[in-house]
Structures are given as C-alpha cells and as structure tokens.
Image (tube, helix red, strand yellow):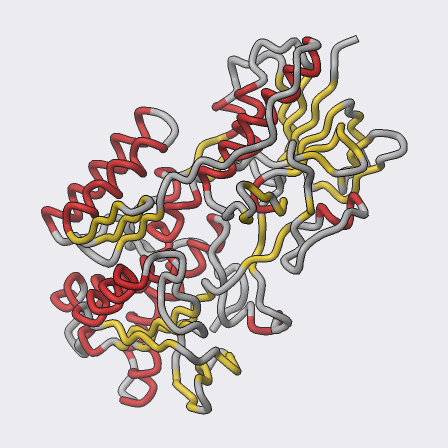
Amino acid sequence: MQHRVVVIGAGFAGLQTVLGLKGSGCQITLIDQRNHHLFQPLLYQVATTLLATSDIAWPIRALLRDRKDVTTLLGTVEDVDRTTREVVLRSGERVGFDTLVIATGARHAYFGKDAWEPDAPGLKTLEDATTIRRRMLLAFERAELTENEAERQALLTFAVIGAGPTGVEMVGIIAELAHRILPREFRRMDTRKARILLVEAGPRILPAFSEDLSQYAAKALGRDGVEVMTGHPVTDCSGDGITVNGQFIPAQTTIWAAGVQASRAKDWLGAEADRAGRVMVAPDLTVPDDPAIFVLGDTAHVVSDGKPVPGVAPAAKQQGSYTAQVILARLTGKPAPAPFQYRHMGNLATIGRNSAVIEYGRFKMRGWLAWWVWGIAHIYFLIGARSRIFVALSWLWVFLSGQNSARLITQKETLKEP
C-alpha cells in the first residue's frame, strides 16, 4: 500500500513539500480552500494597481498537471482526527493520511479589535487586494464628485496601519499614484492634495531593519509626501477615520498591515501554541507528541539558532524542502536530516519609485540600485517564464510611462459597501 501524504495549504511551504516529494512513490493529496497558489510578496502591487491578479497567482492544478501522484482537492478543512488519521473537510468528506503536513498560513490579527476589520481590511488574499484597490480608486472618484471640501479631504486621506515592509511598500505606491500619476486625469480636484499616513505603534518603521536603513526609509517616504507617525498605536478605527494619540483623523480608506494570527491548526491538533496561535514544533518541524504530523510556515513557531524563524516566503520554502527530505528519509530508511536550520536571505523593502533598502548581515544597500536588485530577486522567485515576463514588462511600462497598468474598478465590495 502506498504511503499517504496529505498536505493542507498550497502556499510556499505546502507547494514546496509537494515538489520535494516528486518520485517518492507516495500517494499525495493537496488540499486548499482556493484553487490558486499566490505569490504574496507582490500582493500589495495588485492592491495598488501595479499588477493584475493573474500576474501573481497560478491555478494549482495547472502547476501539478504532470504529477500523477498528486490529487488536488478544493475544500476547507474543519478538523484533524488524530485517532483515525483523517482530515475532516467542511463538505463532510474525510481524507486519510499516514503523514500530514499542515501549512495553512496566517490571517489578519487585530489585537482584540476584530470589529475594525470591515473598515480596515488587511492584505492576505487576492480578494483582500481587489477590495483595497476598489476602495482606493473609488475614493478618488468620489472626491471628484463631491462639492464638500471636508468630505473631499476625508476621501483623499489614506491611512496604512503598520510599518513593516508591506505597509511601507504600500504607502510608497499610493503616494506615487496620488502625486504623480493621477493629477493629469482629474479636473475638479487636485489628487496631489491627498494625505497618505503610515501609522506605527513602535518607535520606528521597518523594525526588522537596522536603524540607519529605517531612518533612510522614513526620510524617503517623507520626500514622497507620506506622513510617518510612530510611537503611538491606533486606539480607534471606523469607516469615518482613525484615532491616534487622542487625535481623530478623518479617513475614508484605512488599510491594516499591523499583525497576523496563525490559522486554526492549533485547535485541530490540540497542540501548544504561542501568542500568535502558531503551533510549537520540534526541531524537525513535527508536533512534539506526533512525529507523523508536520506544521510549517506561518502556522508554526519554528526556532533556529535560538531565534524564532520569521514568517517570510524564503523561510516557508526552506521548511517545505526540509520536510520533504525528512519524509523521504523515513520512507527509504536513511538517517534523518539534522534539525531544521534557517538560512536567512536578507531583508528587502521598496520605498516608492526607484528606491529600496536591502540588508544581508553587515551588507546594506539603499536607493535606486537596491530597487533594481529587489525587482530582480522577486522576478526570479515568480513561478513560470510567463509570469516573469509579464511582471517585468508591467514594471518596465510603469517606469517608462509613469502609468500603472491595473487601474480598473472591478468586482463587488467583499467586506461592505461604503
């Protein structure tokens, strides 16, 4: 009987596990609640009109069409029955396993303020990206229509909460859109009067970077017209605006980039988890009391060299490759690999047009050259030649023409109608 491997989640970690098991002779079942693999590092570029959804997402079945050993199921996991060794789907179907890999990622964390989500959507899925893009573009359109100056200014105020790479990259493109791309297209109002806010509760933006690069990024954003507000958390958030340091700021578009919460894997397994809900795993990425169950990526609390492994794409891919090696070693009777060791690939973030910061150990880079290196690195990690060509051409078009290529208001509002 073939060894049954079930992988939940077709993100970086899950897909890499499946790719690493090629030729293993296993019967592999890949389960995901969406039919596509998403390149999340560029998701903010869909939200801010630089790229189309098809540039950063690929049908799972198409990616694995030549893998006869892989069965792909579109479904939502409700539970894991560790006694019967079955994954329970919402549809009622039960999928048996001998080895289980859980790589279900993370969702937004509002730190106990979940009621803020409809007014401040986060950015984890294509639906999130198109919702944010729709709200942002509609804000400009409604500002063109209104005669009320206070209402117009609220419509032209964009607040991004959280100043990690996603928040910084997002405000940079919004500023580019408002101050350089759109002014020639509107007649009744000046889009350059848009107010773009980056709000960070901590003392500085890009906290994962060294302080000098953080300061450089803050100054670069300031030159692009972004107001950087640090040292005070948002204490209230509604459809009308946000409250920071006791001050209410009218803002019709608010975007959440401040935190994440792991999926429900800890509940399925009844496992110990950290404050963010990530399952505490052993050095070989398995659940401590069940070596047949692996937990990877944003779902897992992984320690390497005494430090928690960050929830970034390179880490997830490395964990997927490692898990495949462990499974193969078990199947062939070979010695198990050494405990998982994370290889840090550096920190990268763009700051608007033609500027970025890169940090790899003591090596640091900033400015336009860093922007080119950032772009080349992201194009390299895209799946398939078509995606690399399309994204490169989109960026080249934006660079030469100054026009974003995906400024279409499509689809319905996924959270609420303003």
Task: Report the residue at 77% width, 25% height from top.
Answer: 97
Task: Report the residue at 42% width, 90% height from top.
Answer: 247
The quarter of the image holding the N terminus is: top right
Relative to residue 404, is residue 289 depicted above or below?
above
Relative to residue 242, is residue 128 depicted above or below?
above
Q: Residue furthest right?
A: 83
Task: Report the residue at 35% width, 43% height from top.
Answer: 346
Relative to residue 295, is residue 276 depicted above or below?
below
Q: 307 and 348: which one is in front?
A: 307
- The answer to whether 273 appears left or right of 32 in the picture is right
Q: Which of the 4 quarters of the picture holds residue 150? A: bottom left
- Locate residue 207, reporting x and y percent: 39, 62
- The answer to whether 365 appears left or right of 164 in the picture is left
- Locate residue 270, reporting x and y percent: 81, 47
Q: How many marks?
A: 0
Q: 416 and 113: which one is in front?
A: 113
Relative to residue 161, is residue 403 depicted above or below?
above
Task: Report the residue at 46% width, 39% height from top.
Answer: 38
- Locate residue 380, reporting x and y percent: 31, 31
- Locate residue 187, reporting x and y percent: 15, 74
Q: Which of the 4 quarters of the picture holds residue 253? A: bottom left
- The answer to whether 416 appears left or right of 52 in the picture is right
